[in-house]
Image (cartoon, rainbow, N blue to C red):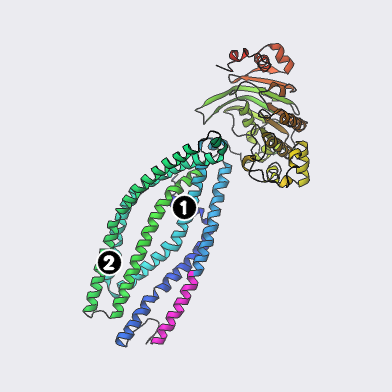
């Protein structure tokens, strides 16, 4: 299938606005037509003054009063049409920009986790912003500058040619060498522009991360290091910009050529005037029209460069839109009327695509019956969190199946799956919004009463009551105004509002102090009741109440049973239990240290 041109895709993205673009184009064409009348009025006025006789296509025998009144009418109409077109164009540009941002944002949200693992958020957002601004610029420039410029040039060439065809031909022909010389310059500049964007995208992503991790910067006192790094980047960008400007100066030859060409045409026009082949009015008319043709030439050249320049960024935007999710919903997904919560892993094989094919599981199988608790333990890197990610379909298994109530996750609708499953992670993901807005992620239509109940169950009301604005308090980026335990309790309250049938707890208490852990553990125990639960934990004290414990090691399930059963086996679990009890000589045996 032949790939559509980038420019065609630009106009297709603007399809909802074609009607408005057409209306604005009509206004601009009208404005160009009105502007063409000024030189004709000037010619008639000059001829009337110099010889007492003139002609004008609207009047048989125009008088001074006729021409002045017409001049006023044309001027007023031009002002009204110009103001209307500028207003409509500005509103169109604003709406188009937000439409394009929504298109890009919606597509980003549809992509799966592997895409974001491979592309840093700062770089993606920079490309998104540059692409949307570029598309808006192309639509605006082509409508506001290219169209009137082209119409003006065509009409002017037609009028000049009707008076003297050699002058019309000479004026039109100067477009050819001008565009050829500019094209050569643009081809050189485009390579440097791509380099400029690559540098800025890479470094912008880093500086965005610096701001996001400002506490780390302050902790290690690396402000000077980051400032020096910014200076180095600025120096590279400036050096590249100097090269671009030098190449840009090479385009002066095209400007000089047009100036010489124009002066030659003026010389010929003045010669015909001196030899009385043209009246003074005709000489002024031709000079005005030649200038009218020359000005659109500059505009069209500038637009040509702007289009080429912005297309570099727009192509990055298109790459984002062309990215496809690794996970897709089938055409007719299943949405069960009710959920029991039986979870089954059936001979699951998995490796991370973005980690050089790193193997994680080789055919693991287990079942969690409805309402039961399964605990997953093992050293770091054995795939405990991967099971959580597979359960919520951040990834799909390479082989085997994961089922809820006997239905493959790949056959379920995304909405049903994400409503049915709840994931509480070690790191609480919160937004720089009010507590209310963060809780609404669990249930968008939740009432304030439901939120307050969820906060009480999660022991979050303990600290929320101390805020002057209560649940309307803004908690800062990533919940920075809350402690770790407070963030985790708020995250649990959000999950309580969601009310999932299957719950996954991924190291939900590992980073908390004793007091916070006690409160969070109590909140989690309330949350667990009546739900199928998978607990991932390093602290074995948190998994002892589980109905079944699975020990993962070397891509397989190595042990399975209750706490007491596994202790009696004297295997990996028993060793981990002894390690946490203080018998550190077991660390080396189980490769937990070198």
Left or right side of 277 for 5 = right
Query: Which residue is at a point 71% across and 14% down the rendered structure image?
Result: 567
The residues colored magenta run: 56-82
On whether residue 530 falls in the magenta region, the answer is: no
Q: Is residue 5 visible?
A: no
Q: Secondary structure at mark 2?
A: helix
Instruction: Tell me if residue 135 can be seen.
Output: yes
x, y (%) of residue 534? 69, 27
Assess disc 1: are there few (<14), some (14-19) or many (≥20) residues with their C-alpha within 10 Å of its C-alpha. Answer: many
> From the image, which quarter does the N terminus lie in?
top left
Question: Dot 2 surroundings within 10 Å: few (below 14), some, or many (20 or more)?
Answer: some
Does 506 sit left or right of 213 as displayed? Answer: right
On screen, residue 121 versus residue 298, left or right, reads right
Examine the image and state in which quarter residue 230 appears.
Answer: top left
Element on which disc 1 rests: helix
How far, Cα to Cα, is label 1 from label 2? 33 Å
Is 449 left or right of 13, judged from the image as shown? right
Q: Which label sits on residue 262?
A: 2
Label at residue 134: 1
- Could you tell me which residue is drawn at 57 percent across and 17 percent down? 593
Q: Is residue 269 above or below residue 179?
A: below
Q: Which mark is residue 234?
A: none
Tell me the quadrant of the picture where the C terminus can be found: top right
Question: Looking at the image, do the residues carrying marks 1 and 2 touch, with CB atoms under 8 Å apart?
Answer: no
Classify 239 as above or below 503. Answer: below
Residue shown at 32% from the left, 57% from the top: 179
- Is residue 81 a member of the stretch shown in magenta? yes
Task: Classify 244 as above or below 385.
Answer: below
Front residue (pair 555, 162):
555
Where residue 97 appears, as percent x and y from the top left, is 53, 54
């Amino acid at each position: 299938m032949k790939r559509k041109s980038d420019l065609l895709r630009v106009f297709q993205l603007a399809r909802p606005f074609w009607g408005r673009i057409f209306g604005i184009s009509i206004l601009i064409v009208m404005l160009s037509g009105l502007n063409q009348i000024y030189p004709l009025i000037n010619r008639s006025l000059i001829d009337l003054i110099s010889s007492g006789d003139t002609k004008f296509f609207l009047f048989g025998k125009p008088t001074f009063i006729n021409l002045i009144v017409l001049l006023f009418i044309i001027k007023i109409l031009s002002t009204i049409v110009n103001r209307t077109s500028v207003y409509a164009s500005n509103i169109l540009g604003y709406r188009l920009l937000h439409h394009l941002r929504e298109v890009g944002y919606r597509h980003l949200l549809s992509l799966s986790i592997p895409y974001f693992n491979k592309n840093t958020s700062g770089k993606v957002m920079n490309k998104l912003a540059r692409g949307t601004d570029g598309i808006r610029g192309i639509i605006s420039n082509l409508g506001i500058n290219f169209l009137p410029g082209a119409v003006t040039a065509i009409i002017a060439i037609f009028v000049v040619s009707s008076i003297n065809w050699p002058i019309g031909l000479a004026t039109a022909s100067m477009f050819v060498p001008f565009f050829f010389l500019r094209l050569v310059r643009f081809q050189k500049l485009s390579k440097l522009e791509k380099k400029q964007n690559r540098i800025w995208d890479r470094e912008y992503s880093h500086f965005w991360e610096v701001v996001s991790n400002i506490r780390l910067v302050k902790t290690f006192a690396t402000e000077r290091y980051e400032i020096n790094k910014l200076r180095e980047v600025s120096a590279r960008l400036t050096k590249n910009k100097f090269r671009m400007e030098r190449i840009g100066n090479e385009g002066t030859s095209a400007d000089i050529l047009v100036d010489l060409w124009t002066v030659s045409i003026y010389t010929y026009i003045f010669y015909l005037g001196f030899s009385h082949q043209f009246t003074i009015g005709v000489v002024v008319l031709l000079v005005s029209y030649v200038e009218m043709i020359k000005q659109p030439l500059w505009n069209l050249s500038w637009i040509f460069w702007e289009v080429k320049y912005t297309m570099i960024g727009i192509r990055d935007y298109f790459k984002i839109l062309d990215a496809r999710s690794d996970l897709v919903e089938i055409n007719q997904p299943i949405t069960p009327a009710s959920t029991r919560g039986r979870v089954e892993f059936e001979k699951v094989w998995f490796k991370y695509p973005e980690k050089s094919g790193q193997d994680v599981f080789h055919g693991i199988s287990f079942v969690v019956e409805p309402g039961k608790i399964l605990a997953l333990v093992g050293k770091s890197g054995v795939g405990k969190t991967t099971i959580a990610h597979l359960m919520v379909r951040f990834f799909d298994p390479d082989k085997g199946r994961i089922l809820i109530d006997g239905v493959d996750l790949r056959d379920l609708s995304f909405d049903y799956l994400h409503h049915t499953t709840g994931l509480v992670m070690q790191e609480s993901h919160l937004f720089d919004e009010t507590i209310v807005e963060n809780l609404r992620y669990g249930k968008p239509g939740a009432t304030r009463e439901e939120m307050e109940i969820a906060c009480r169950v999660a022991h979050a009301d303990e600290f929320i009551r101390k805020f002057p604005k209560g649940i309307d308090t803004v908690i800062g980026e990533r919940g920075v105004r809350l402690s770790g335990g407070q963030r985790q309790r708020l995250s649990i309250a959000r999950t309580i509002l969601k009310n999932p049938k299957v719950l996954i707890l991924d190291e939900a208490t590992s980073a908390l102090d004793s007091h916070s852990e006690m409160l969070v553990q109590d909140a989690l125990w309330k949350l667990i009741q009546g739900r199928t639960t998978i607990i991932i934990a390093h602290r074995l004290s948190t998994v002892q109440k589980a109905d079944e414990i699975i020990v993962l090691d070397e891509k397989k399930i190595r042990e399975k049973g209750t706490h007491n059963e596994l202790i009696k086996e004297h295997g990996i679990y028993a060793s981990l239990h002894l390690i946490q009890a203080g018998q550190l000589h077991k660390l080396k045996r189980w490769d937990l240290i070198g």
